[in-house]
């Protein structure tokens, strides 16, 4: 089993909004979380113990700047499903880059274009932990 961590400026709060939810922020948050899980699920079965956590302030090292950001750790059943050219998350970065998101929620950074960006102008970082 492999563990990964995602840090993103996109609001991926798991609000558990259902079809009867009328709060547009909660609907957007859940939509972003669902999109993230589905994109990861293109290559792996995903499980997690805790939901994404929002933090407001200085981004964790080695990233720079201040903003609201979300940290989420997840596990996969295999160890190298995202391995590309010696990068343990290379395929995952490819898969996530450009996935559309709902941009105006509880995030403080401008999410433009409205998608997860894992290349060049970054708003989402992925690391393999174990």
Image (cartoon, rainbow, N blue to C red):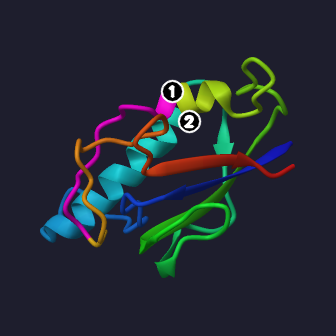
- Distance (Cα) linking label 1 and label 2: 7 Å
Q: Nearer the viewer, residue 62 or 103?
A: 62
Location of the N terminus by quadrant is: top right
Q: x, y (%) of residue 74?
A: 68, 53
The answer to which image quadrant residue 50 occupies is bottom right
Q: Is residue 55 above or below residue 117?
A: below
Q: Range of the magenta residues?
A: 95-105
- Identify the element where label 1 is drawn: helix
The residue pinned by badge 1 equals 95
Is 45 displayed left or right of 19 in the figure?
right
Mark in front: 1 vs 2: 1
Q: Kindly identify which numbered label has been placed on residue 40.
A: 2
Q: Residue at x 62, y 70 (%)?
A: 60
Q: x, y (%) of residue 90?
A: 66, 27
Is 15 displayed left or right of 114 in the figure?
right
- Which SS does the magenta portion mostly show? loop
Is 79 displayed left or right of 104 in the figure?
right
Q: x, y (%) of residue 38?
A: 47, 36
Q: Nearer the viewer, residue 16 or 64?
A: 64
| Circle 1/circle 2 CB separation < 8 Å | yes
Is 114 displayed left or right of 37 in the figure?
left
- Identify the element where label 2 is drawn: helix
Q: Nearer the viewer, residue 24 or 110?
A: 110
Q: Is residue 56 above or below residue 25?
A: below
């Amino acid at each position: 089993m492999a563990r990964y961590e995602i840090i993103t400026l996109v609001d991926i709060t798991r609000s558990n909004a259902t079809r009867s939810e009328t709060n547009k922020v909660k609907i957007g948050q859940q939509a972003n979380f669902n999109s993230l899980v589905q994109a990861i699920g293109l290559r792996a079965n995903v499980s997690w113990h805790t939901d994404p956590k929002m933090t407001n302030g200085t981004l964790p090292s080695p990233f720079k700047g201040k903003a609201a950001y979300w940290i989420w750790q997840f596990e996969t059943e295999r160890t190298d499903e995202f391995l590309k050219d010696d990068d343990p998350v290379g395929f995952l970065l490819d898969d996530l880059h450009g996935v559309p998101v709902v941009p105006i929620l509880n995030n403080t950074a401008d999410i433009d274009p409205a998608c997860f960006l894992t290349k060049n102008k970054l708003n989402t970082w992925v690391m393999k932990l174990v």
